[in-house]
Image: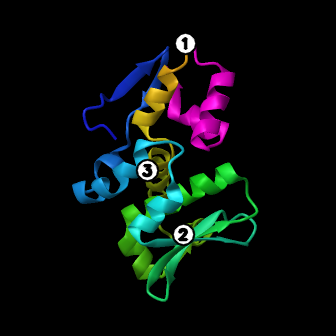
Amino acid sequence: MDKNMQNKSAVNDWVVKSPSREYENLTSEVRQNIDEYLAEYPVKLGALANRLGVKVLLSTLPRGTSGQIGQENGEFVIRINRHEAKTRQRFTLAHELAHFLLHKKRIEEVGGWSENVLLRSGQPAEIEYEANRLASDLVIPSGQLEKAASEYSGPITSEVIEDLARKFGVSIAAMEIKLQMT
């Protein structure tokens, strides 16, 4: 992501959210490792996971569990629920990668978690908010969204939002959250 990006960039009466504080607080080494993957869309999350040394598996998970991260045979493994929509799988992968980037030590301490396990374990809900904010940056990089949105003239309509969501491989709801009206 462009380090010189202003806090908010207006795009046709809409504002593209700037990168989260979670992204901004990553070490420069970590950002160098991930930024090349954030330079195009849709972001190749599987390749990013591979770069980070995280194995990704599509799995049948219990109802209500979108994904989980843990260690198996000494390596980090993310399991994504194969029965969910592709857009949900992409966001879940980004969310679990965010946990890896932000909460690796906690994951190692407890041997891994899913959202259900995390919430029952007494971990603060802020961990999930942090992972969601960074996941949004990973799956819809602000700089790329700003470029993509600038290709449209006039107001950002529901059709434009749908088109942007399709281009980034995310749900319409995720795109609406990333784009905010001024």
Q: Position of residue 54 (x, y in %)?
A: 46, 71
Instruction: Give the residue at x 43% y 53%.
Output: 130
| Image height of 59 relative to 73, above or below | above
Q: CA distance from mark 1 to mark 2?
A: 44 Å
Q: Which residues are magenta?
A: 153-182
Instruction: Give the residue at x 52% y 29%.
Output: 179
Residue under circle 2?
Answer: 118
Residue 47 located left or right of residue 167: left
Residue 28 located left or right of residue 145: left
What element does badge 3 sit on? helix
Q: Position of residue 55 (x, y in %)?
A: 51, 73
Residue 28 located left or right of residue 167: left
Q: Magenta stretch containing residue 55, yes or no?
A: no
Figure coloring: rainbow
Residue under circle 1?
Answer: 153
Instruction: Give the residue at x 50% y 28%.
Output: 148
Residue under circle 3?
Answer: 134
Q: CA distance from mark 2 to mark 3?
A: 18 Å
- Please name which of the two marks, 1 or 2, marks the residue nearer to the observer: 1
- Quarter of the figure with residue 141: top left
What element does badge 2 sit on? helix
The residue furthest bottom is 73
What is the three-letter code of the residue carrying label 2?
Leu
Which residue is nearer to you in this view: 156 or 99?
A: 156
Q: CA distance from mark 3 to mark 1?
A: 29 Å
What is the three-letter code of the residue carrying label 1?
Ser
Q: Main secondary structure of the magenta part?
A: helix
| Image height of 109 relative to 3, above or below | below
